[in-house]
Image: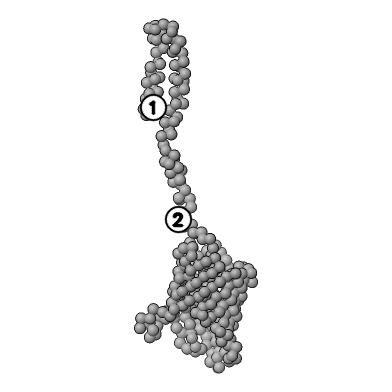
Protein backbone atom coordinates (compact mmCIF):
# COMPACT_ATOMS: atom_id res chain seq x y z
CA UNK A 1 0.00 0.00 0.00
CA UNK A 2 2.82 2.41 0.83
CA UNK A 3 4.43 1.65 -2.52
CA UNK A 4 1.15 2.27 -4.37
CA UNK A 5 0.66 5.58 -2.55
CA UNK A 6 4.18 6.62 -3.49
CA UNK A 7 3.52 5.79 -7.12
CA UNK A 8 0.26 7.78 -7.00
CA UNK A 9 1.97 10.83 -5.48
CA UNK A 10 4.73 10.60 -8.07
CA UNK A 11 2.15 10.51 -10.85
CA UNK A 12 0.38 13.57 -9.41
CA UNK A 13 3.64 15.46 -9.09
CA UNK A 14 4.33 14.86 -12.79
CA UNK A 15 0.77 15.70 -13.76
CA UNK A 16 1.39 19.47 -14.59
CA UNK A 17 4.32 19.72 -17.01
CA UNK A 18 2.88 22.95 -18.68
CA UNK A 19 3.14 24.82 -15.40
CA UNK A 20 6.76 23.72 -15.11
CA UNK A 21 7.52 25.17 -18.57
CA UNK A 22 6.13 28.59 -17.62
CA UNK A 23 7.90 28.81 -14.28
CA UNK A 24 11.32 27.37 -15.07
CA UNK A 25 11.75 27.67 -18.80
CA UNK A 26 13.06 25.24 -21.36
CA UNK A 27 15.65 23.72 -19.08
CA UNK A 28 12.93 22.24 -16.91
CA UNK A 29 10.97 21.16 -19.96
CA UNK A 30 13.85 18.92 -21.03
CA UNK A 31 13.94 17.30 -17.64
CA UNK A 32 10.19 16.76 -17.60
CA UNK A 33 10.16 14.64 -20.75
CA UNK A 34 11.62 11.50 -19.13
CA UNK A 35 9.13 11.85 -16.32
CA UNK A 36 6.36 10.68 -18.61
CA UNK A 37 7.96 7.20 -18.73
CA UNK A 38 7.24 6.33 -15.08
CA UNK A 39 3.63 7.45 -15.61
CA UNK A 40 3.28 4.93 -18.45
CA UNK A 41 5.04 2.17 -16.50
CA UNK A 42 3.11 2.83 -13.29
CA UNK A 43 0.54 0.01 -13.86
CA UNK A 44 3.38 -2.54 -14.10
CA UNK A 45 5.06 -1.38 -10.92
CA UNK A 46 2.28 -2.49 -8.49
CA UNK A 47 2.58 -6.14 -9.70
CA UNK A 48 5.18 -7.00 -7.05
CA UNK A 49 2.67 -5.82 -4.43
CA UNK A 50 0.62 -8.97 -5.15
CA UNK A 51 3.69 -10.92 -4.13
CA UNK A 52 3.02 -9.86 -0.56
CA UNK A 53 1.26 -13.19 -0.23
CA UNK A 54 4.03 -15.44 1.04
CA UNK A 55 4.98 -18.62 -0.86
CA UNK A 56 3.91 -20.64 2.18
CA UNK A 57 0.44 -19.10 2.04
CA UNK A 58 0.21 -19.75 -1.70
CA UNK A 59 1.18 -23.43 -1.31
CA UNK A 60 -1.29 -23.80 1.52
CA UNK A 61 -4.09 -22.45 -0.63
CA UNK A 62 -3.14 -24.81 -3.45
CA UNK A 63 -3.00 -27.80 -1.08
CA UNK A 64 -6.46 -27.29 0.43
CA UNK A 65 -8.35 -29.26 -2.27
CA UNK A 66 -5.90 -32.18 -2.03
CA UNK A 67 -7.37 -33.71 1.14
CA UNK A 68 -10.91 -34.39 -0.16
CA UNK A 69 -9.56 -35.86 -3.41
CA UNK A 70 -8.09 -38.97 -1.81
CA UNK A 71 -11.07 -39.53 0.45
CA UNK A 72 -11.10 -40.83 4.02
CA UNK A 73 -12.36 -44.25 2.88
CA UNK A 74 -9.32 -45.02 0.74
CA UNK A 75 -7.76 -48.33 1.78
CA UNK A 76 -4.34 -48.03 3.36
CA UNK A 77 -1.46 -49.38 1.34
CA UNK A 78 0.89 -51.86 2.98
CA UNK A 79 4.07 -53.11 1.42
CA UNK A 80 2.90 -56.75 1.67
CA UNK A 81 -0.21 -58.81 2.44
CA UNK A 82 -0.65 -61.16 5.38
CA UNK A 83 1.24 -64.32 4.27
CA UNK A 84 -1.19 -66.48 6.31
CA UNK A 85 -4.41 -64.75 5.25
CA UNK A 86 -5.83 -67.99 3.78
CA UNK A 87 -6.95 -68.84 7.34
CA UNK A 88 -7.70 -67.16 10.66
CA UNK A 89 -6.88 -69.56 13.51
CA UNK A 90 -8.43 -72.85 12.40
CA UNK A 91 -11.23 -71.61 10.11
CA UNK A 92 -10.39 -71.05 6.45
CA UNK A 93 -10.95 -67.74 4.71
CA UNK A 94 -12.00 -67.38 1.08
CA UNK A 95 -8.48 -66.37 0.09
CA UNK A 96 -6.12 -68.78 -1.66
CA UNK A 97 -2.39 -68.82 -2.27
CA UNK A 98 -1.02 -67.46 -5.53
CA UNK A 99 -0.13 -69.98 -8.21
CA UNK A 100 3.14 -71.74 -7.36
CA UNK A 101 3.29 -70.37 -3.80
CA UNK A 102 3.67 -72.63 -0.75
CA UNK A 103 3.05 -72.15 2.95
CA UNK A 104 4.06 -74.33 5.89
CA UNK A 105 2.89 -73.82 9.45
CA UNK A 106 3.25 -75.41 12.84
CA UNK A 107 0.45 -74.98 15.36
CA UNK A 108 0.87 -75.69 19.07
CA UNK A 109 3.96 -77.72 18.13
CA UNK A 110 1.45 -80.46 17.27
CA UNK A 111 -0.24 -79.75 13.95
CA UNK A 112 1.86 -79.48 10.79
CA UNK A 113 0.20 -77.94 7.75
CA UNK A 114 1.31 -77.54 4.15
CA UNK A 115 -0.57 -75.60 1.46
CA UNK A 116 0.25 -75.12 -2.21
CA UNK A 117 -1.29 -72.80 -4.80
CA UNK A 118 -2.14 -74.98 -7.79
CA UNK A 119 -3.59 -71.89 -9.51
CA UNK A 120 -4.49 -68.45 -8.19
CA UNK A 121 -7.92 -69.85 -7.23
CA UNK A 122 -7.17 -73.49 -6.37
CA UNK A 123 -5.24 -74.53 -3.26
CA UNK A 124 -4.12 -77.94 -2.07
CA UNK A 125 -3.60 -78.65 1.63
CA UNK A 126 -2.42 -81.42 3.93
CA UNK A 127 -2.59 -81.40 7.73
CA UNK A 128 -1.25 -83.93 10.18
CA UNK A 129 -1.01 -84.36 13.95
CA UNK A 130 2.20 -86.37 14.22
CA UNK A 131 0.71 -88.73 11.57
CA UNK A 132 -1.91 -89.84 14.10
CA UNK A 133 -4.64 -87.82 12.33
CA UNK A 134 -4.11 -86.66 8.77
CA UNK A 135 -6.36 -84.71 6.43
CA UNK A 136 -6.10 -83.79 2.74
CA UNK A 137 -8.24 -81.09 1.13
CA UNK A 138 -8.75 -78.76 -1.81
CA UNK A 139 -10.02 -75.19 -1.65
CA UNK A 140 -11.47 -73.51 -4.73
CA UNK A 141 -12.17 -69.79 -4.80
CA UNK A 142 -15.06 -69.55 -7.23
CA UNK A 143 -15.68 -65.82 -6.81
CA UNK A 144 -13.16 -63.01 -6.37
CA UNK A 145 -14.62 -59.50 -6.34
CA UNK A 146 -13.16 -56.18 -5.32
CA UNK A 147 -14.32 -56.45 -1.70
CA UNK A 148 -15.79 -59.96 -1.44
CA UNK A 149 -14.48 -63.47 -2.15
CA UNK A 150 -16.13 -66.87 -1.80
CA UNK A 151 -14.59 -70.34 -1.74
CA UNK A 152 -15.58 -73.95 -1.16
CA UNK A 153 -13.32 -76.46 0.60
CA UNK A 154 -13.63 -80.22 0.77
CA UNK A 155 -11.45 -82.97 2.17
CA UNK A 156 -11.07 -86.25 4.00
CA UNK A 157 -9.41 -87.09 7.31
CA UNK A 158 -8.11 -90.46 8.39
CA UNK A 159 -5.95 -92.18 10.99
CA UNK A 160 -3.18 -94.30 9.46
CA UNK A 161 -3.14 -96.52 12.56
CA UNK A 162 -6.92 -96.78 12.96
CA UNK A 163 -8.60 -98.05 9.82
CA UNK A 164 -12.02 -97.85 11.51
CA UNK A 165 -11.93 -94.04 11.52
CA UNK A 166 -12.81 -91.92 8.49
CA UNK A 167 -14.07 -88.38 8.23
CA UNK A 168 -15.18 -86.17 5.38
CA UNK A 169 -15.84 -82.46 5.55
CA UNK A 170 -17.03 -79.62 3.40
CA UNK A 171 -16.90 -75.89 4.07
CA UNK A 172 -18.27 -72.81 2.36
CA UNK A 173 -16.33 -69.65 3.20
CA UNK A 174 -17.04 -66.02 2.42
CA UNK A 175 -14.69 -63.14 3.22
CA UNK A 176 -15.63 -59.46 2.98
CA UNK A 177 -12.85 -56.88 3.10
CA UNK A 178 -12.99 -53.13 3.63
CA UNK A 179 -10.11 -50.83 4.46
CA UNK A 180 -8.15 -52.63 7.23
CA UNK A 181 -10.96 -55.03 8.19
CA UNK A 182 -11.73 -58.59 7.03
CA UNK A 183 -15.00 -60.30 8.02
CA UNK A 184 -15.11 -64.08 7.61
CA UNK A 185 -18.11 -66.46 7.66
CA UNK A 186 -17.89 -70.26 7.27
CA UNK A 187 -20.59 -72.94 7.09
CA UNK A 188 -19.20 -76.41 7.78
CA UNK A 189 -20.52 -79.95 7.49
CA UNK A 190 -18.32 -82.62 9.08
CA UNK A 191 -19.12 -86.32 8.80
CA UNK A 192 -17.23 -88.85 10.91
CA UNK A 193 -17.38 -92.58 11.37
CA UNK A 194 -15.38 -94.40 14.05
CA UNK A 195 -15.88 -98.06 14.98
CA UNK A 196 -19.52 -98.01 13.98
CA UNK A 197 -20.31 -94.63 15.57
CA UNK A 198 -21.51 -92.15 12.97
CA UNK A 199 -21.50 -88.43 13.60
CA UNK A 200 -22.52 -85.45 11.50
CA UNK A 201 -21.95 -81.89 12.65
CA UNK A 202 -23.22 -78.81 10.83
CA UNK A 203 -21.83 -75.60 12.28
CA UNK A 204 -21.44 -71.92 11.50
CA UNK A 205 -18.25 -70.11 12.43
CA UNK A 206 -17.03 -66.60 11.87
CA UNK A 207 -14.23 -64.24 12.62
CA UNK A 208 -12.64 -60.84 12.18
CA UNK A 209 -9.18 -59.73 11.19
CA UNK A 210 -8.05 -56.11 11.58
CA UNK A 211 -4.75 -54.87 10.15
CA UNK A 212 -3.53 -52.47 12.83
CA UNK A 213 -0.30 -51.65 11.04
CA UNK A 214 2.42 -52.82 8.71
CA UNK A 215 3.40 -55.76 10.94
CA UNK A 216 0.41 -56.32 13.24
CA UNK A 217 -3.02 -57.85 12.70
CA UNK A 218 -5.57 -58.62 15.43
CA UNK A 219 -7.75 -61.72 15.06
CA UNK A 220 -10.83 -63.21 16.68
CA UNK A 221 -12.67 -66.40 15.64
CA UNK A 222 -15.76 -68.21 16.84
CA UNK A 223 -15.95 -71.94 16.10
CA UNK A 224 -17.63 -75.21 17.13
CA UNK A 225 -15.81 -78.53 17.61
CA UNK A 226 -16.45 -82.11 18.60
CA UNK A 227 -13.30 -83.44 20.19
CA UNK A 228 -14.59 -87.02 20.10
CA UNK A 229 -16.87 -88.77 17.62
CA UNK A 230 -20.42 -88.51 18.92
CA UNK A 231 -19.38 -86.20 21.75
CA UNK A 232 -21.04 -82.96 22.71
CA UNK A 233 -20.15 -79.96 20.52
CA UNK A 234 -18.06 -77.31 22.22
CA UNK A 235 -18.24 -73.63 21.25
CA UNK A 236 -14.94 -71.79 21.52
CA UNK A 237 -13.42 -68.41 20.77
CA UNK A 238 -9.89 -67.89 19.53
CA UNK A 239 -8.38 -64.45 20.01
CA UNK A 240 -4.93 -63.01 19.60
CA UNK A 241 -2.57 -61.09 17.32
CA UNK A 242 -0.57 -61.98 14.24
CA UNK A 243 2.86 -60.43 13.80
CA UNK A 244 3.80 -60.13 10.15
CA UNK A 245 6.81 -60.16 7.88
CA UNK A 246 6.70 -60.51 4.08
CA UNK A 247 7.13 -64.32 4.21
CA UNK A 248 6.77 -65.11 7.89
CA UNK A 249 4.13 -64.75 10.60
CA UNK A 250 3.75 -65.60 14.28
CA UNK A 251 0.27 -65.82 15.82
CA UNK A 252 0.08 -66.03 19.62
CA UNK A 253 -3.34 -66.14 21.24
CA UNK A 254 -5.82 -68.02 23.41
CA UNK A 255 -8.55 -70.61 22.91
CA UNK A 256 -11.40 -69.90 25.33
CA UNK A 257 -14.39 -72.33 25.70
CA UNK A 258 -17.79 -70.63 25.99
CA UNK A 259 -19.34 -73.24 28.27
CA UNK A 260 -18.32 -75.85 30.80
CA UNK A 261 -16.44 -75.84 34.06
CA UNK A 262 -13.45 -74.06 32.61
CA UNK A 263 -15.53 -70.99 31.76
CA UNK A 264 -17.22 -70.85 35.14
CA UNK A 265 -13.83 -71.08 36.80
CA UNK A 266 -12.74 -67.99 34.93
CA UNK A 267 -10.23 -69.63 32.61
CA UNK A 268 -8.85 -67.00 30.23
CA UNK A 269 -7.99 -69.64 27.68
CA UNK A 270 -5.61 -72.29 26.54
CA UNK A 271 -2.45 -70.70 25.07
CA UNK A 272 -2.31 -70.89 21.29
CA UNK A 273 0.69 -70.43 18.98
CA UNK A 274 1.03 -70.71 15.21
CA UNK A 275 4.23 -70.15 13.22
CA UNK A 276 3.91 -69.84 9.45
CA UNK A 277 6.38 -69.44 6.57
CA UNK A 278 5.57 -68.78 2.92
CA UNK A 279 7.80 -69.30 -0.10
Q: Quadrant of residue 241?
A: bottom left
Quarter that holds the N terminus: top left
Front residue of this view, candidates 175 and 132: 132
Q: Is residue 86 placed above or below 19 in the rendered structure? A: below
**Element at badge 1?**
helix
Q: Is residue 229 placed above or below 248 in the rendered structure? A: below
What residue sits 49% from the left and 59% below the top?
76
What residue sits 39% from the left and 10% below the top?
20
Asked if residue 266 lies left or right of residue 67, the reply is: left
What residue sits 40% from the left and 19% below the top?
11
Q: Is residue 270 placed above or below 33 in the rendered structure? A: below
Percent coordinates x, y for residue 3 in the rendering: 39, 27
The tag earlier along the polypeptide, 2 or 1, is: 1
The residue wearing badge 2 is 72
Looking at the image, the residue that sits furthest to the bottom is: 196
Q: Disc number at residue 14? A: none
State how far apart marks 2 and 1 are (Cα): 46 Å
Percent coordinates x, y for residue 214 in the rendering: 49, 63
Front residue of this view, candidates 85 and 102: 102
The residue wearing badge 1 is 3
Q: Quadrant of residue 21?
A: top left
Q: Quadrant of residue 166?
A: bottom right
Percent coordinates x, y for residue 120 in the rendering: 62, 68
Q: Verify CB contact (< 8 Å) between mark 2 and mark 1.
A: no
Percent coordinates x, y for residue 144 in the rendering: 57, 66
Amino acid sequence: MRFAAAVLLTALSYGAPARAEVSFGPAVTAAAAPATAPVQDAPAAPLPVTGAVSPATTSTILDVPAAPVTGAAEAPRFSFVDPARSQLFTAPTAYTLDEGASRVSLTELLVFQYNYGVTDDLQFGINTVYLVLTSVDLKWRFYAGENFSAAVLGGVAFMPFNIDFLSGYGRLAGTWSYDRLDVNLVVSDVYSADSGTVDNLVAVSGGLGWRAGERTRFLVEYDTFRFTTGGEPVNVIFWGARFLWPNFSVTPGYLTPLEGESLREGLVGIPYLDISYSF
